Amino acid sequence: MSDLTLEVALAALESAAEPARAAQMASYHKQKRVVLGVPNPTINSLSQEWRKQLSSGDDGVAARCALAQELWASDVFEARIAAAKLLTQARIRDDAPVWDLLQSWLPDFDSWAIADHAASAIQKRLQAEPARLDIVEGWTGSDHMWTRRAALVATLPWAKLPNPKAEELAARERILGWAAGYVPDRNWFIQKSIAWWLRDLSKHDADRTRAFLTEHGAAMKPFARKEAAKHLPAASHAD
């Protein structure tokens, strides 16, 4: 059994804290929870070390989920990010507990940094089991803005496929349908998520990005339309 407990993990984060950064980070990320001032590379290193330590036992997935949940429940800014990083891995055998835990965090999303780190972990679980897109589709109708946004951020891998297969193209079109449904939503973070998806898509399928903007671009906020078209040739779109 590992001796890595919540207390040990929090102590490691606290020892790496830079108090001079804490106030700046709290302001930038608009946090009311405790912010220690730990740089992201340090959180990366710690979470990688913890993942290795916990994965060495027979109950590795369960141990990682247990610590991740405790870190998340601590409600410390860096601890929540570390919790997400602890579960961000492409291959996890019997990953249902990880998937279930990540879904349980959705209602707690309240800021982009925490939400995006958790979404990165969700991306890996969706890539491992694309049938889970059926569940993600349900997020698009949530009353919780951050859950709706997560549906696009967590599916970004489908925007980045260079040579998608037929089933991947079908999934891409499905997600673009979600994005189209979001266009009337004037929330900045929702508009940003549409733009992010299209911007990444434009690097691999400029024509499909242009088609989306031709159909929906006029209804998007100007900043989102501009961001979505950032990597398209200037002559191929109009602001």
Image (spheres, helix red, strand yellow):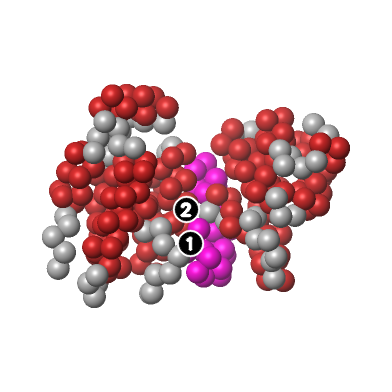
Q: Nearer the viewer, residue 34 or 165?
A: 165
The secondary structure type at the circle numbered 1 is helix
Please name the residue that numbered disc 2 is placed on.
Answer: 120
Q: Position of residue 87 (x, y in %)?
A: 37, 59
Residue for point 62% across, 59% down: 158
The three-letter amino acid code for the residue at tag 2 is: Ser
- Mark 2 residue element: helix
| Quarter occupied by residue 17 | top left
Most common SS among magenta residues: helix
Is residue 183 visible to us here? no
Instruction: Report whether 57 appears left or right of 21.
Output: left
Residue 179, given in percent of the width and then of the height, sits at 67, 48
Callout 2 touching callout 1 (CB < 8 Å): yes
Amino acid type at mark 1 = Lys
CA–CA distance in space, label 2 to label 1: 7 Å
Q: Assess whether residue 177 is covered by the magenta stretch.
A: no
> Residue placed farthest to the right in the image?
235
